[in-house]
Image (tube, helix red, strand yellow):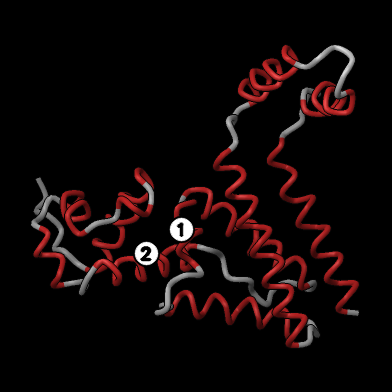
Amino acid sequence: MSPPQPLSRGLVLEAAIRVADRGGVEAITMRRVAQELGVEAMSLYHHVTNKDAILDGVVDMVFAAIKLPGVAYDDWRDAIRARASSARSVLSQHSWALGLMDSRRNPGPATLRHHDAVLGVLREAGFTLAMAAHAVSLIDSYVGGFVLQEANLPMTTRDDVEDVAGDILEHLPADELPYLREMIVDHALRPGYDHRSEFGYGLDLILDALEARRR
């Protein structure tokens, strides 16, 4: 049996993320993080000064997990699309982080590097400073909103969609709400429909609109 791994700041933050994944950000306390690691709470203070330091740290780790938009793309939209898709994937696993990412006052190095890279793609593509600010706000609001919506939907699989849609249809008045019935029957319940694909469609609309404004 291998000896226990020495405690470190990284291990503390990883434990805090696991705690939040199970119970939300409100579950992050020094005591619970210590329990996750199988140590006494006082031992954490050798690596993090307090709970705020943990919250700052987990936000930075979430940003670090999101793919940076690189310069390898010929079209700025491809770079931002890849970054937005990565952000959606990471935040879908850690949706509790949405309320933290813009509220912390001590951003870490990964957070700062991430924001600089996004702005760099936009500025190098010819966006004015004001337009770059508009673009970041719009894209991040869309990604965050979509992740939050997905996290609260009462369905994750095709069977879930059919169950929820069936329950709604069962209680719809026969001759009322025809457009809602049409949307459910002729769109949501059609073979191959996946509500998750709406993310890419909406993102492309935003990027195309920003491209038109950029020009």
Q: Residue at x 29, y 55 (%)?
A: 28
| Residue highlighted by disc 1 | 97
Q: Quadrant of residue 134?
A: bottom right
Tally of numbered tags: 2
Q: Which of the two discs, 1 and 2, sits closer to the camera?
A: 1
Residue pictured at 78% horizontal, 81% vertical: 125
User: Is the C-beta separation of discs 1 and 2 under 8 Å?
Assistant: yes
| Image x and y of residue 176, in percent | 87, 19
**Residue type highlighted by circle 1:** Ala
* CA gap, disc 1 and disc 2: 8 Å
User: Toward the viewer: 59 or 176?
Assistant: 176
Residue tagged 2:
58
Describe residue 126's horizontal placement relative to residue 29 as left or right.
right
Q: Image height check: is 113 above or below 24?
A: below
Q: Nearer the viewer, residue 91 or 142?
A: 142
Rendered position, 53 above or below 94: below
Q: Quadrant of the C terminus?
A: bottom right
The residue under the point 46% across, 68% down is 64
- The x, y position of residue 4, in whole percent, is 11, 54
**In the rendering, at what x and y percent does residue 61 appear?**
40, 66
Amino acid, disc 2:
Val
Query: In terms of secondary structure, where does tag 2 sit?
Result: helix
Q: Badge 2, how many Cα within 10 Å: few under 14, some, many 20+? A: many
Counting from the top left corner in percent of width and height, residue 112 is at: 50, 80
Q: Is residue 41 above or below residue 197?
A: below
How crowded pointer 1 is (Cα within 10 Å; few <14, some 14-19, many 20+) is rated as: many
Quadrant in which the N terminus appears: top left
